[in-house]
Image (tube, grey):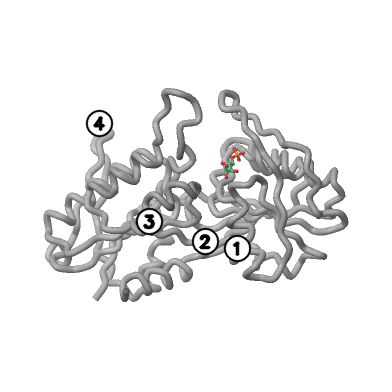
Amino acid sequence: MIKAVVTGNYPDGFNIARGVNAEVIGITEKVFPDGEQYVRLEEPDKVRDSTILVISTMYPMQDQSLLKLLILADALARNQAREFIGVIPYLAYSRQDKVFMPGEPVSASTVLRILKSAGYSRLVVVDFHSNSLLSDFKPYLVNILVSDLLVKAVVDKLDKPVILAPDKGALERARFAAESIGLDYDYLVKSRDRVTGAVSYAPREASVEGRDVVIVDDIISTGGTIAEASRILLKQGARRIFVAASHGLMIGNALSRIMDAGVQRIILANTLSARLEHPLVEYVDISSRIASVLRELIQA
Ligand code: R5P
């Protein structure tokens, strides 16, 4: 029988555990007065010789979440788990996936290597940002695309829909959603100032005139990418703009920035422990997609 540990910051993880009929092993989590973390497997005997799914997420409090995954791995290894698989829908640090400016680290690779050396036999993630690291860490890193599920949540409301990638890096997930549903897709060409973070777009006519557009992206952080892309698409004659993103970090005034740019609705996946309550924001539960990938992985 498959077993699971679900960390307290990701209650939606229980849906994933149910989806694979996993027995959940409880954990105690606390923070010491000095800020250091503590975890304990409540039934350590149940771990021995078993495959354990460690279901968690890494936003917010990315660094603490990473450390929790590491100390949990230590507890699982000490209690002789046969294997443990990290199921981490949002894997933090994925955007620093290359050296953009001399002297920088590749933080995404650091995080992956740390988790691997802690003993995680596989990492199952959702809509991982970096295509280059996905290929470097294949087959260790299992990436699940969900853009089709997000677009399906809104597609019935759309007139002459087209899926739009806000940059070339997002093309794969835009194509995936478009082809799964049978829609057209297009893209814009974005660049970002590496010091200020400001987003700008190269001139490019996308095929959006008179059509409803769904911008598909992996992460919404400050909202700059979506706001800028929406303005350009509306200028190019798009009828209405919808947004489908896997990880809605929605930092600071991201929501108002996006709404001010004319976006009608934002559809997000439930990959984080933070949730935004707003009438124009909708969450899609992607647990059953994750569970079905896990079932295949475990049987293979
Ligand atoms: C960048 O390549 C990512 O795919 C997202 O477009 C980006 O991280 C979004 O960040 P922000 O919302 O701050 O523009």
Marks 4 and 2: CB-CB under 8 Å? Answer: no
For marks 4 and 2 on the same chain, the one whose residue lies earlier in the sequence: 4
For marks 3 and 1 on the same chain, the one whose residue lies earlier in the sequence: 3
In front of the other: label 4 or label 2?
A: 2
Mark 4 sits on what residue?
34
For marks 1 and 4 on the same chain, the one whose residue lies earlier in the sequence: 4
Label 4 – label 3 distance at C-alpha: 39 Å
Mark 2 sits on what residue?
145
For marks 1 and 2 on the same chain, the one whose residue lies earlier in the sequence: 2
Q: Secondary structure at mark 1?
A: helix
Marks 1 and 2: CB-CB under 8 Å? Answer: yes
Ligand 1 near label 4 (Cβ, under 8 Å)?
A: no
**x and y percent of residue 98 in the render?**
46, 36
Please name the residue shown 66% across and 33% down the image.
199
**x and y percent of residue 143 in the render?**
44, 58
For marks 3 and 2 on the same chain, the one whose residue lies earlier in the sequence: 3
Circle 4: residue type:
Asp
Mark 3 sits on what residue?
138
Give above or below for 53 relative to 234. Answer: below
